[in-house]
Amino acid sequence: MLPPKPILFPSSSTNHHHHNLRFVGYLIILILLFPTLADADSNPDDKDSLLSFATNFPSLNWSATTNCCSWDGISCDDKRYRVIRLSIPGRGLRGAIPSSLQNLTSLSFLNLSCNLLSGPLPDRLFSSFNNLHTLDLSYNRLSGYLPNPLPTLQLLNLSNNHFSGTIQKDILQSLQSLIALNISNNNFIGSIPLSICNTSPALVILDFSLNDFTGNIPQGLSACSNLQHSISAKLLLPGNSLMGKIDESITNLTNLRSLVLFGNMLSGSIPHNIGKLSLLEKLELHINRLNGTLPLSLMNCTKLQLLNLRVNALGGSQNLISPISVNSQELTSVITNSVGSYLKVFSPANP
Ligand SMILES: *[C@@H]1O[C@H](CO)[C@@H](O)[C@H](O)[C@H]1NC(C)=O
Ligand SMILES: *[C@@H]1O[C@H](CO)[C@@H](O)[C@H](O)[C@H]1NC(C)=O
Ligand SMILES: *[C@@H]1O[C@H](CO)[C@@H](O)[C@H](O)[C@H]1NC(C)=O
Ligand SMILES: *[C@@H]1O[C@H](CO)[C@@H](O)[C@H](O)[C@H]1NC(C)=O
Ligand SMILES: *[C@@H]1O[C@H](CO)[C@@H](O)[C@H](O)[C@H]1NC(C)=O
Ligand SMILES: *[C@@H]1O[C@H](CO)[C@@H](O)[C@H](O)[C@H]1NC(C)=O
Ligand SMILES: *[C@@H]1O[C@H](CO)[C@@H](O)[C@H](O)[C@H]1NC(C)=O
Ligand SMILES: *[C@@H]1O[C@H](CO)[C@@H](O)[C@H](O)[C@H]1NC(C)=O
């Protein structure tokens, strides 16, 4: 990048010696200014925080002489002043999350998934973010308790880590904007908070798979208005130790696309009005203790692509079952009870 000479040198200058001196002077000033010129727009504190963050991770080869807004994985606001996005998944980042991260106070999106980050989250790490709406720390080796709540969060993915402890009611109370909560495959225990929908009414995706949650599926879940109304609603609680009935009120969540509850100790019968969930694409209830017969309303679930009911105590005479057929064009996978007759009834190949 060469200085635009014609503008810098006034054509009125007549003294040749003076002209040369000025030239040298301008040149020195430009050389001194150059590194900062290139960076003039980005916040020097954010850049320092990023450089400090990167000293922990050799794979982050960010160049200190360029504007941090153009670095790989970084995005800045429209004025290219503050760093608002940091997305560096799968970069082999190993070790603890450096506390320098908390100086990037304008971050709204943070994706550190698929790395080798370990240990608990720094205590006050997230309390310094005022605008964070997306936090994806999935596929790391992080441990400890659920981090301090963040009222601005819309998406929280802590899945595939070693987090433990219970989900405290007051934590959820501070997650009022939450749309997707994915804490699958950790070591969380205790019950699913009864009031989860009062505290986080915007929830559309709830993925608590593969933890050790106990107790019942709270009836309150059916009060999550966005789980009821959103077109991408998913409720995934498989691989826990949940007991009791699948309450009929779950059929209020009429927009559910996935209802996945396999691998628990759920008992009683399949909700009579399951067919109200007519948009279901996945219904996986296998490996529980469900009994009774298949509800007739199931035939209204015409979008089903995956229905799995095997390893339960579902029964009933074939006469009861045979009138049922799932009128799904897309049913690709049917795995039913060992009572082979279900297969005959449900498989599109054998209508
Ligand atoms: C982060 O901010 C604190 C206080 O504002 C400061 O003391 C510290 O040096 C900063 N750390 C980095 C890496 O910029
Ligand atoms: C930085 O690393 C990436 C891969 O992680 C590589 O594609 C890129 O060329 C490297 N840049 C420099 C300046 O070394
Ligand atoms: C984070 O990055 C991973 C890997 O690219 C991607 O699969 C995931 O969807 C990202 N998370 C979010 C919330 O965008
Ligand atoms: C984490 O979960 C969120 C919401 O469920 C999802 O959007 C994101 O893609 C997930 N991240 C990865 C790496 O799969
Ligand atoms: C939760 O995150 C995992 C990645 O860790 C992803 O595979 C899964 O699809 C996410 N669940 C939902 C419901 O998006
Ligand atoms: C949910 O379902 C229950 C029982 O099926 C019903 O009594 C209740 O009125 C429903 N609630 C809403 C909000 O639809
Ligand atoms: C299903 O099991 C419950 C006990 O969990 C029992 O009370 C009920 O009678 C059983 N129903 C049928 C139809 O077998
Ligand atoms: C299926 O849905 C239709 C229309 O909503 C309804 O009239 C019918 O009663 C439902 N069938 C069953 C078995 O629930």
Image (cartoon, rainbow, N blue to C red):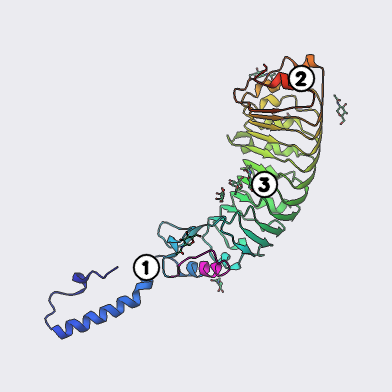
- Looking at the image, which residue is at 48% across and 68% down? 47
Quadrant hosting residue 21: bottom left
Looking at the image, is mark 2 or mark 1 nearer the viewer? Answer: 2
- Which residue is painted at 63% across and 20% down in the image? 327
Residue where numbered disc 1 is placed? 38
Q: Which mark is residue 251?
A: none
Instruction: Please state which of the two labelled residues, at mark 3 or mark 2, is closer to the viewer.
Output: 2
Q: Position of residue 162 (x, y in %)?
A: 72, 55
First-in-chain label (3 vs 1): 1
Q: Could you tell me the amino acid type at mark 1? A: Ala
Q: Looking at the image, can residue 303 be seen?
A: yes
Residue on which disc 2 sits: 341
Q: Would you call the spot at circle 3 few (<14 residues within 10 Å), some (14-19), or many (20 or more)? A: many
Three-letter amino acid code of the residue under disc 3 = Thr
Residue located 61% across and 26% down the image: 303
Q: CA distance from mark 3 to mark 1?
A: 46 Å
Residue 188 x/y as whole percent: 75, 51
Q: Which residue is mark 3?
A: 199
Name the foreground residue: 52 vs 177. Answer: 52
Q: Are marks 3 and 2 in contact (CB under 8 Å)?
A: no
In this view, the mark in front (3 or 1): 1
Q: Secondary structure at mark 2?
A: helix
User: Magenta stretch: residue 51 in it?
Assistant: yes
